Image: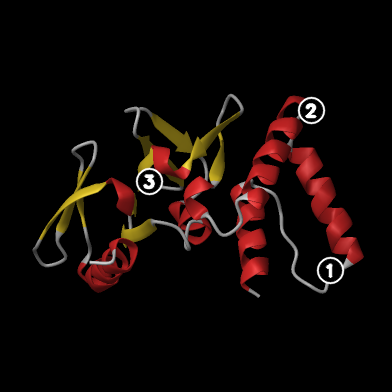
Amino acid sequence: TAYNEYMLQALQFSAADYLLKPVDEDRLIEAVKRVEQRLTNDRKEEHTNVLLHNLSQAGNPSEMRLCLPTLKGFVILKLEEIIYCEAERSYSVFHLANNKTIIVSKPLLDYDNLLQDTSFLRVHKSFLVNLHHVREYQRGEGGVVIMSNGAEIEISRRKKEAFLMKVKETFRG
């Protein structure tokens, strides 16, 4: 059901493992152990808070939060704070509205999958953009988008049609 999909998305946003029905008890225990191992005591409470927040916002992706692991711990962001994500080898670089960047040691594909049903769209093999931060589109083979921070991001020819459709769907025009 749609509700189950939203719950799954909420769990994923909080960097927790997820299980599908029917739940296998051994797999559930294994998932809980994995999560506990990953989190230090001071991080457990914050991850739990993010998870509970996302579950309460199921069906409202704009209010979802994303927990990004960093070298020093983690950062919790509202999706609206992220302008775009950029692939840099096996890392993802998050460009934020406050002009800061966060480097995460996960590939962009992970975040592409995670942010699928939100205002984010993969427009190029190296870029995932938040459509709410697109300020201008310039036609071309694939085209170029100008982001709210002035960054110019090329849209691949293969992604152009999907981009234009998602813009129309997101902004109804």
Q: Is residue 173 left or right of residue 37?
A: left
Q: Is residue 23 above or below residue 45?
A: below
Reading the image, the residue beneath label 2 is: 41
Q: In the image, residue 115 lies at what x, y percent? A: 48, 56
Instruction: Give SS at disc 2.
Output: helix
Amino acid at pointer 1: Val
Mark 3 packing: few (<14 Cα in 10 Å), some, or many (20+)?
many
Amino acid at pointer 3: Cys
Q: Which quarter of the figure is the C terminus placed in?
A: bottom left
Mark 2 packing: few (<14 Cα in 10 Å), some, or many (20+)?
few
Residue that appears at 46% across and 44% down: 79
For marks 2 and 3, the one nearer the N-term is 2
Q: In the image, residue 128 lies at what x, y percent? A: 36, 53
Q: Is residue 147 left or right of residue 38?
A: left
Residue that appears at 67% across and 53% down: 11
What separation in Å lies between label 3 and label 1 (alpha carbons)?
A: 33 Å
**Residue situated in front as seen by the camera: 63 or 125:** 63
Q: Is residue 37 left or right of residue 91?
A: right
Q: In the image, residue 169 lies at what x, y percent? A: 32, 68
- Nearer the observer: mark 3 or 1; the answer is 1
For marks 3 and 1, the one nearer the N-term is 1
The tag on residue 85 is 3
Mark 1 packing: few (<14 Cα in 10 Å), some, or many (20+)?
few
In which image quadrant can residue 159 be found? bottom left
Reading the image, the residue beneath label 1 is: 23
**Outermost residue to the right:** 25
Instruction: Give SS at disc 3.
Output: strand
